[in-house]
Image: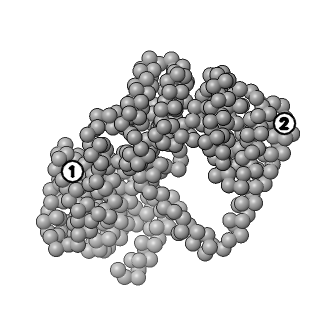
Amino acid sequence: MNNNLSKQLRRVDKLIEKGQREKAVSLLHELITKNPDVPGLYIELAMYYDDTDDTDKAVDILRRGTQRLPDHTNIKIELAYCLRRDENYQESEQLYRQLIDAGQNDSAEARSSLLNGLAEALWGQGKEDEAIENWQTALELDPDNEDAAENLFDYTGGFEFPGTPQWIKDNGGLIHGVLASIENSAKETFEPDNEEHITLVRDQYNIAIELSGLITSEDMMYDLTMMTIYDVYAWLFELPFTLVRFGMVDEALKMGETWAKICDANIFLGDRCVILAQAGLKEQTYKQIEQLLSAFPEDAWVRIKIGDAYYELEEWDKAEKSYYDILTMPDNQDGGDAATDRLITLYRRTGRTREADKLEREQFQKIEDMEEDVESFGSEEISQTQRTQKKIGRNEPCPCGSGKKYKKCCGSVT
């Protein structure tokens, strides 16, 4: 690529950065006209159109590229991808097969990538068994092919993924019920006066209880979360409070007690404690608090839940003490900010406005100090920090709190 063309492409990038997209597209078309034998220009323009969901135009540009440069593989690969995006699955399949046949001597990684594209085109046509076969072959060729791995997870619920535990395969009906429940929770705002929603919530409760009869260890729970799209934990943690909103308090309490015997007892019992308090069951709340303090004396979030329970009972002094205890813990597990927020809410609720204002100022100053500390680092140190931050795994819960896996939420935007 000559220097002048490189300069023009940098100009395209700057135009896009400034939001002058029409000028950028116009310049790319002009560059293709002047340099019709440069394959990267066709791909660059097609990628722009694809990014803006104008897939038809991306396909047209790539067809021009293949007509001009019929032996250029990368243009054909991009065309096969865009055809699939445009739901022209049959032509996409044909092109992928041609590329695979012509690339018998390609690297394992390259062939694995093409097989993944072929599998997606097959799945779009309803050829599910053949698609699964190709994804599995792609992973045999390149175990690090994340696209193939994610697609096999997403389209089959993990049931056909190499290494899927047999107990998940044997209980596909129940597992699909779990996934459907999580999907409904993610897209629905359940209303207690809606008969259909009442049925859905009760069904979710029954599925959660049935699942508790299947899961016997934290290892099984881990396997299940790894084989599904959404975060099963987040759904199970939220469901008891949804049950309470629908007047199903007994069901919520039973669910918390049942799941605490399987995993994350501190969370399930902590939430159960709050629900008991919300229901006005004082003696049972006090008993649950004693059990929690005995089992998890140094757990900051257990202390927060205990404070929340006292708050629900309007026992302000005990709630305040519980929150303050967290602030004095040497390792409060990130619970300090949550405890401070709750103290501010408690002070405002009880008319202690000055104390609430003081805490808010201190919290605001703390945030400002942290921002100044960050700004005091040079750009090199900051970029180094960014490079060494732990990468969020595609199957880990999304940090935004949606309940979905990262790959299906903010990770898909990235």
Q: Is residue 237 above or below residue 392?
A: above
Q: Amino acid at mark 1?
A: Ile
- SS class of the residue under badge 1? helix
Give 55 or 114, whichever is nearer the viewer. Answer: 114
The reply to whether dot 1 and dot 2 touch (C-beta < 8 Å) is no
Would residue 64 be visible to someone looking at this image? no
Q: Dot 1: few (<14), some (14–19), or many (≥20) neighbours within 10 Å?
A: many
Would residue 318 be visible to someone looking at this image? yes
Q: Residue at x 63, y 25 (%)?
A: 284
User: How far from the left and from the top, in percent, is residue 141?
Assistant: 23, 65
Outermost residue to the right: 354
| Model colouring | one colour
User: Residue 345's image quarter?
Assistant: top right
Task: Give the alpha-carbon distance from disc 1 to disc 2, as whole Å.
Answer: 62 Å
Outermost residue to the front: 294
- Specify the quadrant that holds the N terminus: bottom left
Residue at label 2? 353
Give 338 or 268, whichever is nearer the viewer. Answer: 268
Q: Dot 2: few (<14), some (14–19), or many (≥20) neighbours within 10 Å?
A: some
Q: Residue at x 76, y 29 (%)?
A: 315
- SS class of the residue under badge 2? helix
Q: Is residue 157 above or below residue 80?
A: above
User: Residue 389's image quarter?
Assistant: bottom right
Disc marking residue 132: 1
Q: Is residue 71 above or below residue 414?
A: below
Q: Amino acid at mark 2?
A: Thr
User: Residue 213's image quarter?
Assistant: top left
Q: Residue at x 46, y 67 (%)?
A: 13
